[in-house]
Amino acid sequence: MAALRLQMAAAVLIPLGVLAAAASQSWKDITAQAGDRVERIASLADERAQRTVESDRLVLDRMRDLLVPTRPAGGAVPPAPDTRELGRALAGMVADTPSIRALWLWDADGRTLAASRPPTADGADIAGTTLHSQLSAGQAEVLVPPGQEPVKGTAAPSGVGAFSQRAFTLVRRLSRADGSLAGIAAVSMSPVHFDDFFRRATRDDPATAVALLSRDGRVMAGGPVPAGDARADTSCPGAAAVWRISPLDGRERLTACRMVANAPLVVMVGVDRSQVEAAWHQRLGWLTLLTLPVMGIFCGTTLLAMRRARRERRAAKALRGAEARREQAESALLRTQRLQALDQITGGIIHDFANLLMTVRSGAEILCHRPHTEPQREVLDAMLQAITWGERLTRNLRTFSRRPQANLDPVRLSDMADDIAELLRPALRGDIQLATDLPPRLWPLRLDRTEFDLALLNLAVNARDAMPRGGTLRLAAANVHIAPATRESERTGGLMGDFVRLTISDTGDGIPADILDRVFDPFFTTKQDGRSTGLGLAQVQSMVGQAGGAALADSLSARVPGAAAGGTTITLYLPRSDEDEDGQDAAAGRSPTDEVPDIDGNGRQVLLVEDNPAVCKVMQHMVEGLGFAVQATATADAAQVLLTERPDISLVLCDIVLPGGRDGLALAQGVRHMHPGLPILLVSGYGDKVAEAESLGFVIVAKPLDSTHLRQALARCLAPTQPAPGTGAGTGRGIPR
């Protein structure tokens, strides 16, 4: 009996166990199939929504072209489009695009310009509405759901009736090339178009519900239709279908959702749980009738094999990914090391090549001043041409090694408004507005464009940090003439003549009065935690000084201590260029020697510190030719000894790059400390420390140089006043940075 009972129990329990396993697996299969189906439909609906929105945006682009036609290069401004022609064009667009119900076009003030269907008698203006305010403030697009008025708490204009009920509308701001508001366009998309597509996609399973929703849960198209003001939950935890209870009708569905990539829309596809359970019950009946234990075993074995294969594939993929990442990291490291090595080699080549060119140029100039025949003159001209090519090659090498030489290029601020806006907007936050006022008749300038752009970025970053709660950064320029003995001339350090005054002002907290005079000092900063090097405004002053102008700082809080309002204004005075409208130098007829000052050394002692013997001989010859007596040495330590032994030395002429433990900049700083007032002229063909030397106020002349540039540099160095720290000094040939 015991054996029979065991056999009976086995006969009942084993089939029941097999049936339970089969039923469980059957439920999983049916749920997976239903999930695949709703995911596939969701993907199709998502693709259709994206295509429709993209098509509608192309229509909006065409509407912008109708309202703001492209101005041909050098041509006149196109005339304003005729409203009747606009209406016919919009009607034609609607006829060509079945997904569009209607089109509207308003001007910048919100008045109706045209519509694909005639508005009602009381018009379709949106002036004064929240929708118009949002787009005027800079918002690019607004999606208006069905049934939502364009203005919360007010009635919609009757001419905009398609904004409500069974239509949703995409409204776009139309901007001109300068960013100003040109008009507003709207395209109303018919939900019927989506409803027809949803019906076709679910014709094999009418119980499947498809809905197109806004991100806040409003039903745009499809169903189920919400009860009252109910909204759907549009959160999409993943691409796979999950069981969810819809707030629209309270029914549980296996739901797949997709966020539409190019619009604030969500596609949701769900199959009712009762439908899935009905299919499962049907299959469960067949499983009850047919006991297929072998099939269950095979299914389990196959399932295990599939899981094992997936694990193996994931492991292999992870291994290949790790190997690829390692190879990429090694390749990037090798490239960085090669570039660093090449940069160091290039820097050394620049220095040596500048010395070589200087030696050859000096020799050629000496020969040019001696009697020579015409064939000899041709050879000398060829030598000077080759030297010029070598100097051009040196500039290219500086650019390659990321130490470009400063070049003053002709520019007009009037033509740079778009470039300046494009340069500064990425550096500002979204809560900061950028306003530019650059009149069309500003005078031409000569600037180092790279340094000018960097100066604007430094000022924009300072303004951004000074406006933590948002504000406005404004750039304005005007032509000014500074007369002698005026307040403006006194504030700018004695500037006189024609200038372009560029003001950069913010609405931030301002600068305290006790530090206003120090803001241009190198390394001075009020920012904490190492967020600033203190060289931003020093670079601005250096750039302006290089161009021959001046920089001033004003602050509302500095002028009115304790004032509620604040703000800082940086004013740059940039000298007018001597170029006429055709870009020709008005002073081209002047002889270069007219601009070279006369210098008589009168036997004064000059300490020359240069480690290259050939360059040392050339420079000694040029300095002695100006009437100076030269004491030459090759190292900083030897120069320090000579300064101690020879108190009659009246000027130090030193190369920045020197052998040994101290370079020329360190020597210059030591001389300035030990011998205050002793003029120092630094020479460099390599830009590694030029920026630091400029920020410390040293006069610098670039290699290769000739007697003219040396004479000009010595005149500046021996002038009664040294350049202010941070302004730097150039040679007209540019100082490598």
Image (cartoon, helix red, strand yellow):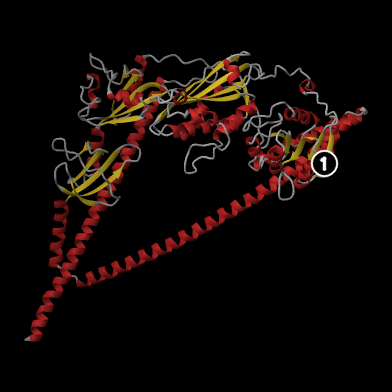
Q: Residue at x 68, y 31 (%)?
A: 729
> Residue 172 appears at what percent x and percent y?
35, 27
Q: Residue at x 77, y 46 (%)?
A: 635
Number of marks in the rendered image: 1
> Residue 587 occupies which quadrant of the picture?
top right
Is 608 drawn above or below residue 317 in the view shown? above
Q: Is residue 93 visible?
A: no
Q: Nearer the viewer, residue 695 or 307?
A: 695
Is 6 drawn above or below residue 351 in the view shown? below
Residue type of the residue flagged with mark 1? Ala
Q: Nearer the viewer, residue 420 or 541?
A: 541
Q: Nearer the viewer, residue 698 or 575?
A: 698
> Residue 19 occupies which quadrant of the picture?
bottom left
Q: Is residue 718 visible?
A: yes
Quick one: quadrant of the N terminus?
A: bottom left
Quick one: quadrant of the C terminus?
A: top right
> Residue 510 appears at what percent x and percent y?
45, 28
Is 4 drawn above or below residue 210 in the view shown? below
> Residue 388 appears at what percent x and percent y?
77, 33
> Residue 281 occupies which quadrant of the picture?
bottom left
Q: Residues within 10 Å of mark 1 (few under 14, many from 20)?
A: many
> Residue 14 appears at what percent x and percent y?
15, 75
Q: Residue at x 32, y 35 (%)?
A: 52
Q: Seen in the image, is 377 located left or right of residue 42?
A: right
Question: Of helix, strand and loop, which one carries label 1?
Answer: strand
Is 649 drawn above or below residue 565 in the view shown? below
| Outermost residue, left side | 1
Query: What residue does disc 1 label?
Result: 632
Q: Seen in the image, is 459 located left or right of residue 198?
A: right
Q: Nearer the viewer, residue 550 or 165?
A: 550
